[in-house]
């Protein structure tokens, strides 16, 4: 969610609270007070003007209902007023100087000499660049640029296995979404916490993994591994391109069961698209997925 959307939501909420405040009746006159007497709740009408209290009988329904409603509206007004003031302060901060108050712009305004001497992982774009350059799990099954299977070239220069994968890769590339193609992935593999892997800054970047080889037959190669630069969450993206082929469906069902059994969840860790000869993949669907998970 970008700043404009946040401002829009806060503005609508502030307007809604203003409507609540305008709808609350006059708070003048007598008000309801509650007291506990002999273990029972008793109602009194208190006059601010005279300072007197008058007991309200339970049979006086009209007066009790009127003052109870007024009591509720007073509490509602106080809460709405407090919340509106907080929201209006946020709107004032966000709208007054959008350039200097936008945290995502801080790194962009730094001099290049400073950027080069700051740990790039602190920046959204820097983190994404580091993630894109990482090779801890990006060990492709085929190391050369083009082979009998990977025949289709993307805008970024990758060779992929289908025209639909070209479309997905190109939409990701055009929208600035970092991605890896066909990473090596073994869902059942477990990390050895006694053998950390350190990055160039001396911080732990991960751990060596038992039961993992990028070239084993049991190693999976999901079509895409994609990153949300804002949240730093990465997803696997599998595209199923031949859903009208029973053998293809059976093969991929087994692969998905391995992934799901390892604790990965479709929609949370795994993005899935599909098509067959009568129902091709649409770019509008790709864009909706990118907007939902990766924007």
Image (spheres, grey):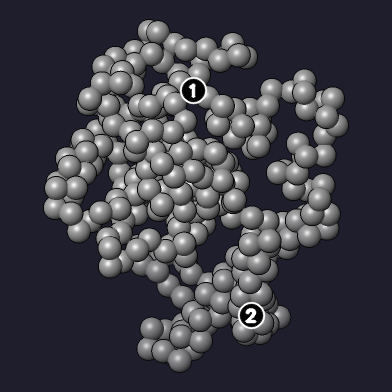
Horizontal side, residue 199 vs residue 197: left or right: right
Q: Residue furthest top?
A: 194
In the drawing, what numbered circle is on residue 216? none
- Viewer can see residue 58: yes
Q: Compare residues 164 and 39 and report the one nearer the observer.
A: 164
Location of mark 2 (residue): 19
Earlier in the chain: of badge 1 and badge 2, it is 2
10 Å crowding of disc 1: few (<14), some (14-19), many (20+): few
Q: Position of residue 107 (x, y in %)?
A: 76, 36
Residue 274, located in which quarter of the rendered image?
A: bottom left
Q: How many marks?
A: 2
Q: Position of residue 225 (x, y in %)?
A: 43, 38
230 relative to 202, above or below: below
Q: Position of residue 4 (x, y in %)?
A: 68, 61
Considering the image in quadrants, where does the N terminus appear? bottom right
Distance from Cα at disc 1 to Cα at disc 2: 55 Å
75 relative to 266, above or below: below
Horizontal side, residue 214 vs residue 160: left or right: left
Location of mark 1 (residue): 135
10 Å crowding of disc 2: few (<14), some (14-19), many (20+): few
Q: Secondary structure at mark 2?
A: helix
Query: Which residue lies at the image location 78% right of the left edge and 60% below the top edge?
Result: 95
Q: Compare residues 58 and 5 and report the one nearer the observer.
A: 5
Horizontal side, residue 109 vs residue 58: left or right: right
Query: Which residue lies at the image location 43% right of the left edge and 72% below the top edge?
Result: 42
Query: Which residue lies at the image location 14% right of the left edge and 53% below the top edge?
Result: 246
27 relative to 94, above or below: below
- Viewer can see residue 92: no
Q: Position of residue 238 (x, y in %)?
A: 34, 45
């Amino acid at each position: 969610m970008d700043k404009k959307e946040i401002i829009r939501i806060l503005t609508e909420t502030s307007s809604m609270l203003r409507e609540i405040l305008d709808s609350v009746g006059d708070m003048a006159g007598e008000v309801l007070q509650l007291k506990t007497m002999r273990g029972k709740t008793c109602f009194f009408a208190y006059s601010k003007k005279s300072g007197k209290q008058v007991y309200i009988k339970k049979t006086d329904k009209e007066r009790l209902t009127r003052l109870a409603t007024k009591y509720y509206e007073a509490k509602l007004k106080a809460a709405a007023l407090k919340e509106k003031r907080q929201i209006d302060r946020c709107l004032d901060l966000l709208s007054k100087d959008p350039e200097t108050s936008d945290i995502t712009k801080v790194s962009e305004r730094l001099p290049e000499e400073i950027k080069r001497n700051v740990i790039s992982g602190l920046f959204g774009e820097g983190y994404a660049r580091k993630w894109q350059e990482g090779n801890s799990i990006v060990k492709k099954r085929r190391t050369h640029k083009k082979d009998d299977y990977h025949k289709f070239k993307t805008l970024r220069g990758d060779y992929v296995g289908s025209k639909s994968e070209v479309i997905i890769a190109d939409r990701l590339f055009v929208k600035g979404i970092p991605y890896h193609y066909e990473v090596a992935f073994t869902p059942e593999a477990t990390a050895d916490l006694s053998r950390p892997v350190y990055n160039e800054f001396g911080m732990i970047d991960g751990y060596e993994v038992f039961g993992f080889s990028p070239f084993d037959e049991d190693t999976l190669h999901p079509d895409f591994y994609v990153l949300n630069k804002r949240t730093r969450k990465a997803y696997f993206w599998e595209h199923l391109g031949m859903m009208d082929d029973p053998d293809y469906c059976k093969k991929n069902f087994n692969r998905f069961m391995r992934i799901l059994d390892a604790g990965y969840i479709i929609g949370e860790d795994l993005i899935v698209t599909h098509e067959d000869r009568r129902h091709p993949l649409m770019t509008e669907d790709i864009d909706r997925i990118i907007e939902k998970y990766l924007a």
